[in-house]
Image: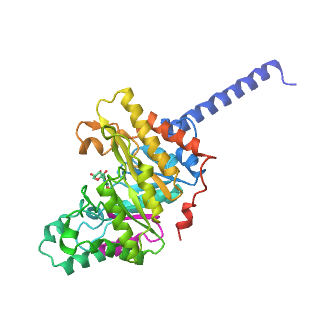
Amino acid sequence: MPSPRTRVVVIGASVAVVVSAVIVVLSVSTSTGGPGATAPGEPLRDLAAQVGLRIGTAVDTDLLGAEPQYDEIAASQFSTVTPENVMKWEVVEPQRGEYDYSAADELVAFAQEHDQLVRGHTLVWTNQLPAWLTDAAASLSADELRGILEEHVTNQVAHFKGDVWQWDVVNEPIDDDGSYVRNIWYTALGPDYIADAFRWAHEADPEALLFLNDYGIEYGGPKTDAMLDLATRLRADGVPIDGVGFETHLDIAFGKPDLLAAMTRFTEAGFDVAVTEADVRATLPVSEEQQDLQAELYASSLRACLQLERCLSYTVWGFDDQYSWIPGWFPGQGAAGIYDEFMPKPQYTALQRELEDAIGSMPTRREPSAHLG
Ligand code: XIL
């Protein structure tokens, strides 16, 4: 029998153990991510896994490793990642024939470490081209420009072979009125640059899913019609196209699109679809009522994706308002994300609830990892 004094010491020691255990637990939960880690309920990726949906975020690689809460949320809440900028031409081929994949490689490593898939964004676009290319474009022959494009697409897809699940092969090729965007590619090569890019990408990585990606096709209308036409013609010509990405940059001023109707036109035509860049902006400051509307637009866009077996992934274009592209591109607007200062907003909760509701009531989906070689 321990003496009363030893018993006090023993009890004191176990109290100390308990107290220090509590301190350890508290410090672990703050050091591994604070609010992100303690968002109530199950993480989005765990819920989405139960209905076979991949849920993703765009990642700003400058923040990786620099802001622990950013890493923690990106890793724990999402099962796919998209590089926000570092797979774009100006970053990966800043000088002709000189490739720099270092930042994108870091993101691929992050994804692999956290059991995430990668959406590659993007091979061919109008914007974020390097100066050596835009400066020279007008004086290059069509053949030379086509050669540059082939070399770029092939080099980039080969570099990431086996590591990229879906590629946005051609980004934003259609204008609001349904005509082709008159960028350097279209001007020199006509619409064939699109088919060529898909063929080259497929040759370099036959397993990757190949997408067209665009904004404003959520609402129906001439742009949606033109996109469906384009995808259908490509497929009819034997071009290896798998799907169409709906960027889904929404603004509460434009109301709620019938995304389910728009996406269904593509799935019925035999294409996969994905929500690739969701955010919902509003004019600042945002009232509570407007925030509710933002949450509803998030929820309804996710619901549309959940209702379609062929909607493979739902990606938000960054998760935290602090780092959103919106204030820089749409002056006076913002609050477009699902977190602010690493705290989940009602927009986050709306997505979480939508996933919870879907579990048990949704059709069996394809297992996305089956697409990886
Ligand atoms: C945006 C990035 O978020 C910004 O950081 C960058 O300055 C410009 O591009 N459609 C797209 C994305 O396909 O690549 C864009 O990303 C947003 C609109």
Q: Position of residue 138 (x, y in %)?
A: 12, 71
**Residue nearer the viewer, 8 or 98:** 98
Is residue 148 found inside the magenta-colored segment of the image? no
**Residue nearer the viewer, 216 or 38:** 216
Q: Position of residue 103 (x, y in %)?
A: 36, 59
Question: In the displayed image of the protein, which residue is found farthest to the top?
Answer: 4
Q: Residue at x 62, y 47 (%)?
A: 361
Does residue 198 appear to the left or right of 36 in the view shown?
left
Does residue 340 appear in this view?
A: no
Q: Residue at x 42, y 49 (%)?
A: 259
Does residue 57 appear to the left or right of 332 in the view shown?
right
Does residue 296 appear in this view?
A: yes
Determine whether 144 is above or below 28 in the image: below
Q: Position of residue 365 (x, y in %)?
A: 58, 57
Question: In the displayed image of the protein, which residue is found farthest to the bottom?
Answer: 143
Question: In the displayed image of the protein, which residue is found farthest to the left?
Answer: 139
Determine whether 174 is above or below 241 in the image: above
Determine whether 308 is above or below 350 in the image: below
Tag count: 0
Q: Position of residue 298 (x, y in %)?
A: 43, 42
Is residue 158 found inside the magenta-colored segment of the image? yes
Does residue 362 appear to the left or right of 277 in the view shown?
right
In the picture, residue 134 is in which quadrant? bottom left
Determine whether 337 is above or below 310 in the image: above
Task: State which quarter of the image contains the N terminus.
Answer: top right
Span colored in magenta: 151-170
In the picture, residue 29 is in which quadrant? top right
* Colour basis: rainbow
**Residue nearer the viewer, 277 or 113:** 277
**Residue nearer the viewer, 230 or 211:** 230
In the picture, residue 244 is in which quadrant? bottom left
Q: Residue at x 22, y 73 (%)?
A: 190
